[in-house]
């Protein structure tokens, strides 16, 4: 187990170095390129949502997560666009067009260094996406009235199960930024390893450490930046 954790940390460090080296020139995002100042990227991705116990924040891709300052310095020009520290359970990336995505990478910053497990799930639209999220504070059971009798029943949450994830990764989040990359997607209906999106599609990234289904895992507050989406 210790060897696996060390290997994941080394991989995260290598990924961080690679992405920083890329940022010194122009980032290779496939069909999203710098020729038109990444206008196609901004037109294809909506506001990214971070869902946590108690609410959510929405972040404009260009102002908060992908611009010259965020990619080169992992910082923000204006505090109004800064990503807040929260125990995010889901990071939701909405799509506004049909895309074939090869990889998704993201940097994460945490004051307390923590190994985070990330699971990816794709939904064709909000109507089929999770609405009843299980947080660490969420109860497992509730009392309902059945035939005029109070009965203790299990609460049914609609978070997806791990076996339904289409990709997964680990991130060693730390104060000087860690990173992860999702690729080789196992999307139902496709065998090519790409994530195929449509207008209205949603990519849910669940941070397993903060999910109510994993109370034994160490929770972690973090913020994030440098979202890199490569389409082909």
Image (cartoon, rainbow, N blue to C red):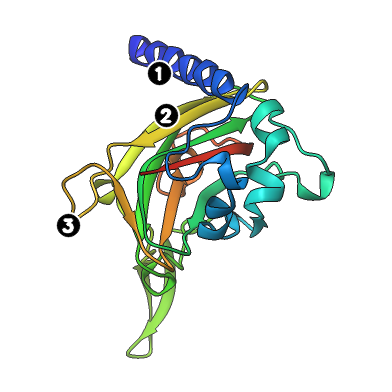
* Snapshot quadrant of residue 150: bottom left
- Secondary element at image label 3: loop
Identified at 59% across, 22% down, the residue is 113
In-image side of 69 versus 91 (left or right) = right
- Badge 3 is on which residue? 189
* Snapshot quadrant of residue 174: top right
User: Could you tell me how far apart the alpha carbons at marks 1 and 3 are, in whole angstroms?
Assistant: 30 Å
Return the x and y of residue 162 as percentages of the image width and height.
30, 46
- Please report contact status of discs 1 and 3: CB closer than 8 Å, yes or no: no
- Secondary element at image label 2: strand
- Badge 1 is on which residue? 8
Identified at 64% across, 32% down, the residue is 71
- Badge 2 is on which residue? 170
On the rendered image, what quadrant is the N terminus found in? top left
* Picture layout, residue 138 above or below residue 84: below
On the rendered image, what quadrant is the C terminus found in? top left
Return the x and y of residue 170 as percentages of the image width and height.
42, 29
Asked whether 97 or 57 is in front, the reply is 97
User: Could you tell me how far apart the alpha carbons at marks 3 and 2 are, in whole angstroms?
Assistant: 25 Å
Identified at 34% across, 37% down, the residue is 168
Tag of residue 123: none
* Picture layout, residue 91 above or below residue 85: below
Asked whether 130 or 69 is in front, the reply is 69
Q: Earlier in the sequence, mark 2 or mark 1?
A: 1
Q: Earlier in the sequence, mark 3 or mark 2?
A: 2
Crowding at dot 2, Cα within 10 Å, few <14 / some 14-19 / many 20+, comes out as many
Crowding at dot 3, Cα within 10 Å, few <14 / some 14-19 / many 20+, comes out as few
Return the x and y of residue 152 as percentages of the image width and height.
38, 70
**Whether residue 209 is visible:** yes
* Picture layout, residue 32 above or below residue 145: above
- Secondary element at image label 1: helix
- Please report contact status of discs 2 and 1: CB closer than 8 Å, yes or no: yes
């Amino acid at each position: 187990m210790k060897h696996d954790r060390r290997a994941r940390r080394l991989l995260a460090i290598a990924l961080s170095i690679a992405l920083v080296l890329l940022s010194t020139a122009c980032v290779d995002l496939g069909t999203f390129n710098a020729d038109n100042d990444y206008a196609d990227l901004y037109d294809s991705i909506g506001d990214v949502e971070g869902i946590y116990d108690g609410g959510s924040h929405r972040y404009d891709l260009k102002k908060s997560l992908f611009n010259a300052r965020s990619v080169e310095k992992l910082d923000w020009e204006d505090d109004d666009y800064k990503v807040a520290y929260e125990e995010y359970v889901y990071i939701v990336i909405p799509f506004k067009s049909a895309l074939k995505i090869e990889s998704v990478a993201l940097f994460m910053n945490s004051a307390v260094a923590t190994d985070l497990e990330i699971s990816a799930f794709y939904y064709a639209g909000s109507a089929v996406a999770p609405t009843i999220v299980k947080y660490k504070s969420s109860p497992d059971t509730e009392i309902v009235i059945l035939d005029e009798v109070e009965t203790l029943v299990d609460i049914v949450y609609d978070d997806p199960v791990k076996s339904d994830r289409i990709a997964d990764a680990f991130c060693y989040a730390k104060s000087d930024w860690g990173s992860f990359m999702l690729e080789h997607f196992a999307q139902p209906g496709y065998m090519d390893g790409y994530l195929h999106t449509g207008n209205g599609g949603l990519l849910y990234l669940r941070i397993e450490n903060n999910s109510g289904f994993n109370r034994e895992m160490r929770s972690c507050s973090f913020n994030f930046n440098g979202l890199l989406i490569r389409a082909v």
